[in-house]
Image: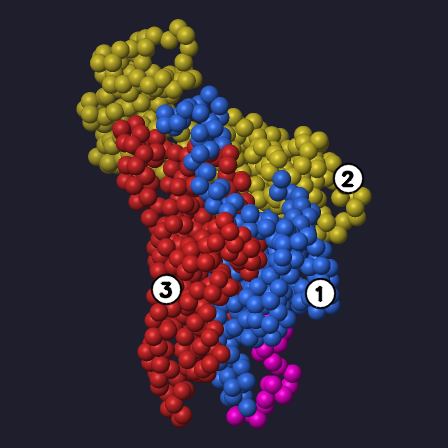
Amino acid sequence: MTHLSLSNVSKKFVETFAVKDFNLAVERGEFVSFLGPSGCGKTTTLRMIAGFEAPTAGKVILDDVDVTSKAPNQRNVGMVFQSYALFPNMTVAQNIGFGLRIHRESEAAIKQRVSEMLALIHLEKRGSNYPHQLSGGQQQRVALARALAIHPQVLLLDEPLSALDAKIRVSLRAEIRSIQRALGITAIYVTHDQEEALSISDRIVVMNAGAIEQVGTPFEIYNFPQTAFVANFVGTLNTAEAEVIDPSKGLIRMDAVQLESDSPEIKSGQKGEKITIAIRPERLHFLSEGKRANVFECKIENITFLGSVVRVQVSVGNVKFNNDTFNNPFLELPKIGEKTQITCARDAVLVLKN
Amino acid sequence: MADPTQADSPGQPLVRSFLPTDLLVWLGVLPFFLFAILFILWPSSSLVVGSFQDIQGHFTFKNIVDLFTPSILNSYLLSIQISLVTAVAGTLFGFMLAYAAVLGGLPRWVRTAVMTLCGVAANFAGVPLAFAFVATLGRTGIFTASLRDAFHFDIYQHGFNLYSFGGLALTYLYFQFPLMVLIIAPSLDGLRREWREASENLGASTWQYWRHIALPILLPSLLGTMILLFGNAFGAYATAYALTGGFLNLITIEVGNQISGNVLYNPNLGLALALGMIVVMSVSIGLYTWLQRRTARWLR
Amino acid sequence: MRKINLWAWLWIILGGLYFFGPLYGALDFSMREKRGILSFVAYENVLKDPNFRDSFTYSTLIALATITVGLILIVSTAYWVHLRLPQARPIVDFITLLPFVVPAIVLVDGFIQIYSGPPFALTDTPQGTNVLLMFGYIVTAMPYMYRSVDAGLRAVDVRTLTEAGQSLGAGWITILFRVILPNIRTALLSGAFLTFAIVIGEYTFASLLARPAFGPYMVLLGQDRAYEPAALSIMSFALTWAAMMLIQFLGRGAPGQGQVAGAH
């Protein structure tokens, strides 16, 4: 059942489109992320849902009601801002209760709801503190509680974690996700951090230059990127130019070596067609027992230790690939300059649409 | 910028090669403190001593007692009134103007122009300002004359008088409201857009946003500026003297009369009058501090 | 949105009228000395008056002395506080704000009380009174001067610059004159122009210390003549305007440059 839908929404600033023909249907209780680089239109889209920007064209429909031209204070939409935007002159409890006070709830009801919310964000004892007395992570939790206190139909989060430290970011995003699940509230989450989007979302909308590149589950977005932009933006990726040799067998040539791929784009392609292929670093493996498809001679160029993974840069002819291997104390690393063999499965070779 | 006191934590020698001990470090500010003592603190405190002396230097309470004669009390009252009126009016008008220039959604050049003109107007005070008002709104001033010539309407026949309380207040406002604009504009800039959006998002109207968020946040700086405007008007002497020729019975004029020795030469009474001014300023600053504590509880 | 714009324009226009009204009045009035025609006679009269030249020169000299002595005192103090005595900042800040609390007329009263009699007897000679006047003006201008210099020093991170200079082998004098001062040039000039604007037309100190300065000259002229004061008003305004424009021109991009003064 569609809860929130945006149809053909566009936003034009002077002569340029910040958002163009945006179409999306969000289910009730779904957690959807807008992912993309800065300036891709993700925040503008979010602000159109909140009512801070009026779309140049298109419709925003929430619970079967067209809210496109409603003022922000007439929509029942909760928003969490990147900079927390807590009111500095109010205590934590007053901040959380502000929306209810505006809606003229009774003092008793406000008090009740505020203490519920404080319990939800585990800040029961901080109700009478002022925002500047809290840490960044605590402030953002208060902002979340303030947005949720008014029982919004949708929760909007505009890069809520990007002002926080790395560790708090990870724990708070898990907290946001579990609160959202517990309340069953529909949430739209804007971020430029692919790891964040992958870990928190039911679905991801990858955006670029005001348009949607791909919509899918984190699994689909990561494993089956449909465009070069998505493949490059989400995770790291080896890309190379190649040429189709035999579409029926999935045979292609990359520089001096031949590869086999399961990609449907090759099957439906023409012999001699130029394509761009992509291989995730973790899908490359050093040497393997026995003869199988896609084994190439390579030379070790560089080794970088990244913590949980070790990244080895190799050259296959003129093409440079990154290989990621999970780190463990017994890992036997090759030496720089050494010649060895590298391999990847047929289904690891993706073809990117340009 | 980092707090400099933090960088100076003990055991972290920074620039420590020039002078040996901490006591000597204070020598660097000795000239300044000497200057402050000689030309601010001593002159101010000498008022206390002189106020209790007669012209021969004998101890007396007469000067202090004289402060409570009706004419002198009226001078204080008049000065306090005009300072209060121009501070409040200057705050209101200056705030509206700053609001219009900063948040009114006008082109950028309007703001630049307003800030520049206010910078000039806040500094264009004293004698020349009084002359400009005389030339405009005096008995033969341009505005007065053109109204009389064009409409046979004489503002002086209808209660207006530049050389009175109202006229002086109008003149003081010329430097009062621009000062307000200059000081409050950065605070208006400091109102973050997200606060407004967050309040709208929670259902608040524009009025509710100002009532619950923007005004409470601005209140400490509004009060602070108002006290500055009050002091600004309370100590003003040149403008009033040049405008009214010393006939309006302000306390500054009274002090001037007592010490410059025209008819009323009594320097010791002058000192007592000045002491009274310091008392008034101290009381108003105390009042301000108290208000500031109440309105800015969330700051600390 | 449109409604807000109209409302905003209304206040801007009101402010503009208040600002330009008296200026227009003074300008118009100053040109009416000759009946029936507009002329610059009043301006000529003022400029021809030897008392004008003398008092203006006197005030300019006093202003220059105030700027020189005041800047030396304030820059050295502010620099030292930034570098070595951050714990003295609150008290220095407080002292520099005192002139706001103690009106000029009160201060000059105290000056006369202390310095007119023995042992100082400064008011017995013109030179002594001039020195006293200069110190009075330093006090008056101090809040503005200190704020300007302090903002300048804040913006350049004196501590690091000084340490960098020391590590390169420079001595105190070299650091101050080759590194610090050039970096706060804008702040120094702003402070100087602001001080000039304050001192040039100041009346209270000059009149009560009975010095032949420009402020008392203007008041005297105001009592005797009709059109010349308006001309003087316009000329003073032009001077204030020029000082403020210079400050603004210098202060482009430099943060925290105050431009509020006052000698009312």
Crowdedness of circle 3 by 10 Å Cα count: few (<14), some, many (20+)?
A: some
Q: Position of residue B275 (x, y in %)?
A: 64, 55
Q: Which mark is residue B73?
A: 1
Q: How many marks?
A: 3
Q: Which chain is blue?
A: B
Q: Position of residue A161 (x, y in %)?
A: 52, 35
Q: Compared to C163, does A323 lie above or below?
A: above
Q: Is residue B74 left or right of residue B252?
A: right
At mark 3, the secondary structure is: helix
Q: Which mark is residue A112?
A: 2
Q: Look at the image and say whether residue B168 sits in the magenta stretch.
A: yes
Asked if marks 1 and 3 fall on the same chain, the answer is no
State how far apart marks 2 and 1 are (Cα). 56 Å
Disc 1 marks a residue whose amino acid type is: Leu
Give A319 or B73, whichever is nearer the viewer: B73
Q: Which residues are magenta?
A: B149-171
Q: Which mark is residue C58?
A: 3
Q: Is residue B243 visible?
A: yes
Q: Give the residue displayed 73% in from the left and 36% down from the top.
A: A116
